[in-house]
Amino acid sequence: MTMTRRGPRLSATDWVDAALALLTADGVSSVKISRLCERLDVTKGSFYWHFGDLDSLWEAMAERWRETHDATFTGLGEVTALPPADRVEALATMLMSERNLTVETAIRDWARVNPRVAESVRRIDNEVFDAVYAALLELDIDAERARLTAGLLVYAGIGYIHAHDGLPSPTPDELRSVIAALLA
Protein backbone atom coordinates (compact mmCIF):
# COMPACT_ATOMS: atom_id res chain seq x y z
CA MET A 1 0.00 0.00 0.00
CA THR A 2 1.40 3.39 -1.00
CA MET A 3 1.16 6.21 1.53
CA THR A 4 0.97 9.72 0.16
CA ARG A 5 1.46 12.96 1.97
CA ARG A 6 -1.66 15.11 2.10
CA GLY A 7 -0.31 18.08 4.02
CA PRO A 8 2.90 20.12 4.10
CA ARG A 9 6.29 18.52 4.66
CA LEU A 10 6.76 18.13 8.40
CA SER A 11 9.89 17.94 10.52
CA ALA A 12 10.30 15.74 13.57
CA THR A 13 9.95 18.91 15.66
CA ASP A 14 6.57 19.58 14.05
CA TRP A 15 5.43 16.14 15.14
CA VAL A 16 6.77 16.62 18.66
CA ASP A 17 5.15 20.04 19.03
CA ALA A 18 1.84 18.67 17.76
CA ALA A 19 2.07 15.75 20.20
CA LEU A 20 2.81 18.12 23.10
CA ALA A 21 -0.13 20.31 22.07
CA LEU A 22 -2.39 17.26 21.91
CA LEU A 23 -1.10 16.05 25.26
CA THR A 24 -1.77 19.45 26.80
CA ALA A 25 -5.23 19.77 25.29
CA ASP A 26 -6.55 16.24 25.69
CA GLY A 27 -4.24 14.28 28.02
CA VAL A 28 -1.85 11.37 27.76
CA SER A 29 -4.25 8.90 26.18
CA SER A 30 -4.83 11.27 23.26
CA VAL A 31 -1.28 10.99 21.95
CA LYS A 32 -1.83 8.44 19.22
CA ILE A 33 -0.41 8.26 15.73
CA SER A 34 -3.84 8.36 14.12
CA ARG A 35 -4.87 11.47 16.10
CA LEU A 36 -1.64 13.23 15.22
CA CYS A 37 -2.00 12.36 11.54
CA GLU A 38 -5.54 13.71 11.58
CA ARG A 39 -4.47 16.90 13.35
CA LEU A 40 -1.54 17.46 10.99
CA ASP A 41 -3.48 16.35 7.91
CA VAL A 42 -0.88 13.78 6.85
CA THR A 43 -0.69 10.03 6.50
CA LYS A 44 1.03 7.60 8.84
CA GLY A 45 3.93 7.36 6.42
CA SER A 46 4.99 10.84 7.46
CA PHE A 47 5.05 9.78 11.10
CA TYR A 48 7.13 6.68 10.35
CA TRP A 49 9.55 8.75 8.27
CA HIS A 50 10.56 10.52 11.50
CA PHE A 51 9.86 7.97 14.24
CA GLY A 52 10.10 4.21 14.49
CA ASP A 53 7.18 3.98 16.88
CA LEU A 54 5.18 5.89 19.45
CA ASP A 55 7.84 5.30 22.12
CA SER A 56 10.35 7.16 19.94
CA LEU A 57 7.95 10.08 19.71
CA TRP A 58 7.53 10.13 23.49
CA GLU A 59 11.29 10.16 23.95
CA ALA A 60 11.54 13.08 21.52
CA MET A 61 8.74 14.81 23.45
CA ALA A 62 10.71 14.36 26.68
CA GLU A 63 13.82 15.77 25.03
CA ARG A 64 11.88 18.78 23.72
CA TRP A 65 10.46 19.31 27.19
CA ARG A 66 13.99 19.18 28.62
CA GLU A 67 15.24 21.67 26.02
CA THR A 68 12.41 24.04 26.93
CA HIS A 69 13.35 23.77 30.59
CA ASP A 70 17.03 24.22 29.74
CA ALA A 71 16.22 27.47 27.98
CA THR A 72 14.38 28.65 31.05
CA PHE A 73 16.74 27.47 33.75
CA THR A 74 20.21 27.79 32.27
CA GLY A 75 20.38 31.37 31.18
CA LEU A 76 18.37 31.70 28.01
CA GLY A 77 15.15 32.70 29.73
CA GLU A 78 14.19 35.99 31.32
CA VAL A 79 14.34 34.42 34.79
CA THR A 80 18.12 34.66 35.07
CA ALA A 81 17.99 38.47 34.76
CA LEU A 82 15.79 38.79 37.85
CA PRO A 83 17.15 39.65 41.29
CA PRO A 84 17.77 36.46 43.32
CA ALA A 85 14.63 36.60 45.50
CA ASP A 86 12.43 37.26 42.45
CA ARG A 87 14.23 34.45 40.60
CA VAL A 88 13.40 31.96 43.37
CA GLU A 89 9.78 33.06 43.25
CA ALA A 90 9.65 32.83 39.45
CA LEU A 91 11.17 29.35 39.44
CA ALA A 92 8.69 28.21 42.07
CA THR A 93 5.65 29.63 40.26
CA MET A 94 6.56 28.30 36.80
CA LEU A 95 5.10 24.93 37.69
CA MET A 96 1.68 26.44 38.20
CA SER A 97 0.96 27.19 34.54
CA GLU A 98 -1.67 24.79 33.24
CA ARG A 99 0.27 23.93 30.06
CA ASN A 100 3.45 23.16 31.97
CA LEU A 101 1.56 21.16 34.57
CA THR A 102 -0.13 18.90 32.02
CA VAL A 103 3.05 18.22 30.07
CA GLU A 104 5.15 17.81 33.19
CA THR A 105 2.72 15.32 34.72
CA ALA A 106 2.62 13.23 31.54
CA ILE A 107 6.40 13.27 31.08
CA ARG A 108 6.99 12.28 34.70
CA ASP A 109 4.47 9.45 34.40
CA TRP A 110 6.22 8.25 31.25
CA ALA A 111 9.59 8.48 33.05
CA ARG A 112 8.44 5.77 35.44
CA VAL A 113 8.66 3.20 32.66
CA ASN A 114 11.24 4.68 30.27
CA PRO A 115 14.85 5.04 31.48
CA ARG A 116 15.79 7.60 28.81
CA VAL A 117 12.86 9.82 29.72
CA ALA A 118 13.67 9.31 33.41
CA GLU A 119 17.20 10.57 32.76
CA SER A 120 15.79 13.75 31.15
CA VAL A 121 13.57 14.28 34.18
CA ARG A 122 16.52 13.78 36.56
CA ARG A 123 18.61 16.30 34.62
CA ILE A 124 15.82 18.87 34.73
CA ASP A 125 15.25 18.36 38.45
CA ASN A 126 18.97 18.87 39.07
CA GLU A 127 19.06 21.99 36.89
CA VAL A 128 16.09 23.46 38.74
CA PHE A 129 17.71 22.63 42.08
CA ASP A 130 21.00 24.21 40.95
CA ALA A 131 19.24 27.38 39.77
CA VAL A 132 17.30 27.77 43.04
CA TYR A 133 20.39 26.94 45.12
CA ALA A 134 22.50 29.50 43.26
CA ALA A 135 19.85 32.19 43.74
CA LEU A 136 19.68 31.42 47.47
CA LEU A 137 23.47 31.66 47.78
CA GLU A 138 23.27 35.07 46.06
CA LEU A 139 20.92 36.12 48.86
CA ASP A 140 23.76 35.37 51.32
CA ILE A 141 21.97 32.35 52.75
CA ASP A 142 24.54 29.93 54.13
CA ALA A 143 25.30 26.93 51.92
CA GLU A 144 23.65 24.29 54.13
CA ARG A 145 20.42 26.27 54.57
CA ALA A 146 20.42 27.13 50.84
CA ARG A 147 20.80 23.43 49.98
CA LEU A 148 17.95 22.42 52.28
CA THR A 149 15.65 25.25 51.16
CA ALA A 150 16.34 24.59 47.47
CA GLY A 151 15.61 20.91 48.04
CA LEU A 152 12.40 21.72 49.90
CA LEU A 153 11.18 24.00 47.09
CA VAL A 154 12.04 21.49 44.36
CA TYR A 155 10.40 18.63 46.28
CA ALA A 156 7.33 20.79 46.87
CA GLY A 157 7.16 21.57 43.16
CA ILE A 158 7.38 17.91 42.20
CA GLY A 159 4.75 17.07 44.81
CA TYR A 160 2.51 19.79 43.42
CA ILE A 161 2.77 18.21 39.97
CA HIS A 162 1.55 14.88 41.29
CA ALA A 163 -1.03 16.03 43.83
CA HIS A 164 -2.43 19.28 42.44
CA ASP A 165 -5.82 17.76 41.63
CA GLY A 166 -6.40 16.52 45.16
CA LEU A 167 -5.11 19.43 47.21
CA PRO A 168 -5.83 23.15 47.23
CA SER A 169 -3.52 25.13 44.95
CA PRO A 170 -1.89 28.20 46.42
CA THR A 171 -2.52 31.50 44.73
CA PRO A 172 0.50 33.43 43.44
CA ASP A 173 0.21 35.79 46.44
CA GLU A 174 0.13 32.86 48.87
CA LEU A 175 3.15 31.32 47.18
CA ARG A 176 5.05 34.63 47.39
CA SER A 177 4.21 34.83 51.10
CA VAL A 178 5.47 31.31 51.79
CA ILE A 179 8.67 31.87 49.84
CA ALA A 180 9.27 35.18 51.62
CA ALA A 181 8.89 33.37 54.95
CA LEU A 182 11.35 30.67 53.87
CA LEU A 183 13.86 33.30 52.82
CA ALA A 184 13.48 35.43 55.97
Image (tube, grey):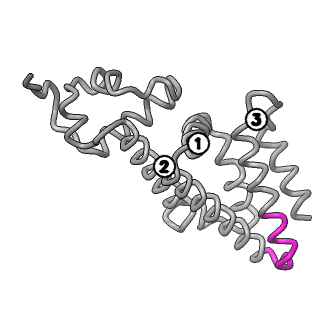
Amino acid under disc 3? Ala
Q: Residue at x 71, y 38 (%)?
A: 162
Q: Which residues are magenta?
A: 139-150
Amino acid under disc 2? Trp
Label 2 neighbour load within 10 Å: few <14, some 14-19, many 20+: many
Q: Residue at x 58, y 34 (%)?
A: 102
Q: Which residue is mark 3?
A: 163
Instruction: Give residue 105's position: percent from left, percent from top.
Output: 61, 38
Q: Which residue is mark 1?
A: 104
Q: CA distance from mark 1 to mark 2?
A: 8 Å
Q: Which mark is residue 181?
A: none
Q: Give the mark nearer the N terminus: 3 vs 2.
A: 2
Q: CA distance from mark 3 to mark 1?
A: 12 Å
Quadrant in the picture for the C terminus: bottom right
- Does 94 sit above or below residue 130? above
In the figure, residue 131 lies in which quadrant? bottom right
Q: Residue at x 22, y 28 (%)?
A: 44
Amino acid under disc 1? Glu
Element type where label 3 sits in the image? helix
Q: Give the mark nearer the N terminus: 3 vs 1.
A: 1
Q: Which mark is residue 65?
A: 2
Instruction: Give residue 85's position: percent from left, percent from top.
Output: 76, 64
- Give 1 or 102, whichever is nearer the viewer: 1
